[in-house]
Image (cartoon, rainbow, N blue to C red):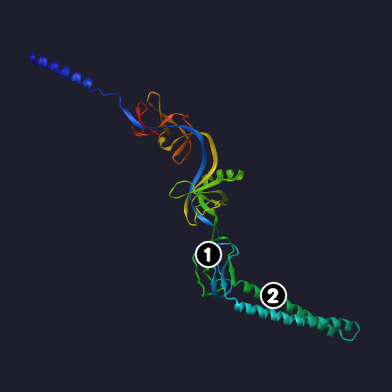
Amino acid sequence: MKRVWITIALGLSLACSGAKQKPADDRIPVTVAVAEQKDVPTQLRAIGTVQPLSTVAIKALVSGQLTRVWFREGEDVRRGQMLFTIDPRPYQSALTQAQANLARDQAQLRNSEADAARYADLVKKDYVTKEEYDRITSGAEAARAVVAADRANVENARLQLAYCEIRSPIDGRTGSLQVHGGNIVRANDVSPLVVINQIAPVYVQFALPERDLETLRARSGRSSIPVEATRSSGGKAVARGQLSFLDNAVDPQTGTITLKGTFPNTDRALWPGQYVNVVATLATQSNAVVIPSQAVQIGQGGQYVYIVTADQGVEMRPVTVSQAIGQQTIIQAGVAPGETVVIDGQLRLTPKSKVEIKNKV
């Protein structure tokens, strides 16, 4: 009998213990954000490289000794500014000789023309034969041709002398000096004397997938497309410009189309050869519903989000994504402005879960 009471007591004890240990509904901690409605720009992003608007390799057009360099390496120069001087004395002598030859042949021409005028009167009076007159007039024509050739030689000599002064053809910045004063330079040598880059304004070249081609063509036909450039390390835009070039063919190997943006670059924020992040703004989408991109999940039925309900439960709702822009995603359908979406902790959630909001972004 004693054993029966002990057994009953143990059973009651275990029953009471089990009632006390019944777990309450666990709430899953999550981080949430509220869906916003705002105007969002439609943008295309790429990595681009800065290129000079124009590049000129300065070469000598005549041979001779380089007597003077008029600039310092890395200095800004203006169009028409003197860069180099080549010893002009041999070319000055050639010009003087060509001018002397011209003066001599012009004197001979005047004499031949005077003879031709006299013989024209004499042949009318039959004092000279027609053959003698033709010979004199032919000599005058030959003298005119010689004078014309002399004038061409003078102009060529003057041009060669002008080539002894090398001036900048553009506004730009000089690079490393390849030939210093005192050296002998040759006409049209392979190596340039210096290279000048025009960097204000400047190009930024980048490539976009061919799927964006139709959008680009349609948008560029209506108005200009603004382009922003930021440094590869991130941060705010360092320069703003306009899309100025759309290539005439898609690269079949990469499936991309090449574009260029022109930037004023008056503050020299962009430098040739530099890598930058490029953002081209095609349009602005008004009253778009925006949520953090990390809220969007992918399942067997497509993309979805978890919506937090009024009773701290969750609703698994399919969504239609319009566009992802950086850390934000534009929702075309599925989420209303002001609804709360889960952005962290989704892996532990089920449609019957209850949540505890630990953080709100």
Where does the image place residue 54, in percent across and percent down from the top left? 56, 59
Q: Amino acid at mark 1?
A: Val
Name which of mark 2 and mark 1 comes first in the sequence: 2
Q: CA distance from mark 2 to mark 1?
A: 33 Å
Where does the image place residue 105, in percent across and percent down from the top left? 73, 81
* Neighbour tally class for label 1: few under 14, some 14-19, many 20 plus, Cα within 10 Å: some
Q: Which residue is mark 1?
A: 195
* SS type, badge 2: helix
Question: Which quadrant of the figure contains the N terminus?
Answer: top left
Q: Say which quarter of the image contains residue 142.
A: bottom right
Q: Say which quarter of the image contains residue 13.
A: top left
Total of numbered circles in the picture? Answer: 2
Q: Is residue 13 left or right of residue 226?
A: left
Where does the image place residue 40, in percent across and percent down from the top left? 51, 37
Q: Is residue 309 left or right of residue 136?
A: left
Q: Amino acid at mark 2?
A: Ala
Question: Which quadrant of the figure contains the C terminus?
Answer: top left
Residue at the location (69% across, 79% down)?
99
